Amino acid sequence: MRRPRVVVFDYGSGNVRSAQQALERAGADVTVTADAMTARHADGLMVPGVGAFAECMRGLVAAGGAEVVEYRVTAERPILGVCVGAQVLFTSSTEHDTATKGLGVFEGAVTRLDATRVPHMGWNTVDGAAMPLFDGIPGDERFYFVHSYAARPPVADTEIALGDHGGPFVAAAVRGCVTATQFHPEKSGRVGLTLLSNWLRSM
């Protein structure tokens, strides 16, 4: 059986090597590149991201990533956004009290968590039992999070899984060919690999 070809888009944000290694363990042939044409035509595309929303958006746009995402959405080719790489798929963010436009694949704003302790850093459960993305993952399993901002439910025309830190937030979202996880599957051990394997099987 052919291993799916996945590009980790290297636009200057995110731990691309840990993402590469996790995807390879999950069963993909992985290329880390900022080449837009390669990213357009791979079987799957991972968009990583750490740090500030606005900075990630600037880097992604400068590397041609906005056009890559638009092309893949239109062509119905799988995309996985992780952490801030997931957030930029939403309409906007209010990080640092400044409205920054996102890619608008998912409707909704990314806003600060309403919790006593921010950032939300560590392991937490995710209510995703009804979603194929979480097949084979018991509801009491935990994923690794590092974030201060997140999208809030509901999200129109989108399957979502919720986490909770000072209130519910979108921990994962799936709409058509596009998947987003606020947590880091590449840092979530065995359950993260199971989720990545589920994503690869969707191709």
Image (cartoon, rainbow, N blue to C red):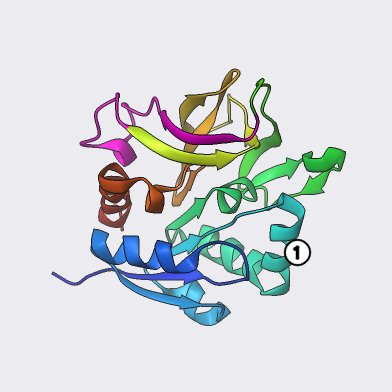
Residue stretch rendered in magenta on the structure = 118-141
Compared to 67, does 82 lie above or below?
A: above
> Visible in this render: residue 44?
no
The crowd level at tag 1 (other Cα within 10 Å; few <14, some 14-19, many 20+) is few
> Main SS of the magenta segment?
loop
Q: Residue at x 31, y 26 (%)?
A: 129
Residue 161 percent location from the top left of the image: 44, 30
Q: Residue at x 67, y 66 (%)?
A: 60
Q: Residue furthest left?
A: 1
Q: Residue at x 66, y 28 (%)?
A: 113
Residue 122 percent location from the top left of the image: 47, 36
Q: Quadrant of residue 27?
A: bottom left
Q: Residue at x 86, y 43 (%)?
A: 98
Is residue 120 in the magenta section?
A: yes
Q: Nearer the viewer, residue 203 or 74?
A: 203
Q: Quadrant of residue 143?
A: top left
Q: Element type at marker 1?
A: helix
The amino acid sitting under disc 1 is: Arg
Quarter of the figure that contains the N terminus: bottom left
